[in-house]
Image (tube, rainbow, N blue to C red):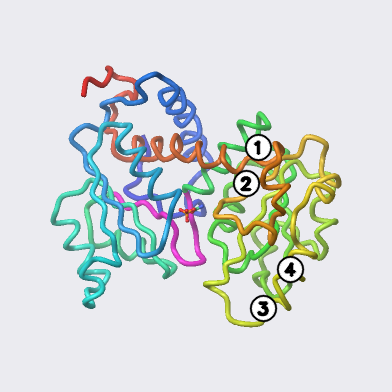
Amino acid sequence: MLHRKDLLGLQETSVEEIQLILDTAEGMKQILSRPIPKVPTLRGKTVCTLFYEASTRTRTSFEGAAKALGADTMSLTVAASSVTKGETLKDTILTVSSLGPHAIVMRHKMSGSPHFAAKYTKAHVINAGDGCHEHPTQGLLDLFTVREKKGRVEGLQIAIIGDILHSRVARSDIWGYTKMGASVRLCGPSTLMPVEIEKTGVTVCRRIEEAIEGVDVVYMLRIQLERQQAGLFPSVLEYARLFGMNPKRLELAAPEAIVMHPGPINRGIEISAEMADSDRTVILDQVTNGLAVRMAVLYLLLGGGASPDEGTDET
Ligand code: CP
């Protein structure tokens, strides 16, 4: 079990906890490969998803993960909720908590909002992305995917390319990859590179060729136009030319290097259509692994000691 109430970020998650989640996710992936991919481990528990920002992958995989473990789900669509009438985050959390969920999976545009929410509920709070801060389960599923494809994380060279400044995925990945012993290089427009990011143990490269030379993993980030002020790079075409990934550029990486992306992708901008559809690219494996990793997180926070494989589901 995880001996913590909430999962808010990988910065504060230990190597041992990350290892436990990844190992547990292996077992969850086996459960998902069965003819009936469901166990009753979390029967009687309720998981609430509370998303203040759009999501395809994270929300559906948390809901799928909860159901695969036998839990019930509640889903609050913020755009159709009393938030539109001015209800504050504190009052929304107090209200949702009164309905008795055992976990609240929360995404919000403000960094630190899940930390704030966690103070007002007894439910386990899982950060599903807070502003530009962290997206811990994305970091975990990325680690799981690298370990699955490469057999290890320790000792690998990993390049993260793009809009580092606005990327909560980049921050969780940097914490996750460096804690698990990989070397991380960053590259992107200088206007989209956080100051003093080297203090996290990464190397910043000016040119993409330098960043990807010989690496085992190329991790492309989405340009987050919705979080940017105007004028942080000259044009989308210029960005694609300087920082986009395509099969020709990938030749600079190690021969078996894989290409990752958290999704949603902007085809033709950070990744060419040919690269996105290539068998060197593992974007859909990342999505699939998100289900197993989120099952592991829910089980380790809510499971209360029962084996995930205890019994078979009869519903
Ligand atoms: N990677 C990710 O968080 O995707 P969604 O925004 O679709 O959840």
Residue type at the position of mark 4? Tyr
Q: Is mark 4 within 8 Å of ligand 1?
A: no
Q: x and y percent of residue 43 in the render?
A: 21, 32
Q: Is residue 38 left or right of residue 155?
A: left
Q: x and y percent of residue 232 in the render?
A: 67, 78
Earlier-in-chain disc, 4 versus 2? 2
Q: x and y percent of residue 214 in the render?
A: 83, 44
Earlier-in-chain disc, 2 versus 1? 1
- The residue at which mark 3 appears reads as 232
Q: x and y percent of residue 238 in the render?
A: 77, 71
**What residue range appears in magenta?**
124-136
Camera-side residue of 237 and 85: 237
Distance between mark 3 and mark 1 Cα atoms? 33 Å
Q: Which mark is residue 177?
A: 2
Earlier-in-chain disc, 4 versus 3? 3
Residue type at the position of mark 3? Leu
| Mark 1 surroundings within 10 Å by alpha-carbon count, few (fewer than 14), some (14 through 19), many (20 or more) | many
Q: Is mark 3 within 8 Å of ligand 1?
A: no
In the rendered image, the residue lying farthest to the left is: 98
Camera-side residue of 34 and 12: 34
**Decide: marks 2, 1 in contact (CB < 8 A)?**
yes
Residue type at the position of mark 1? Val
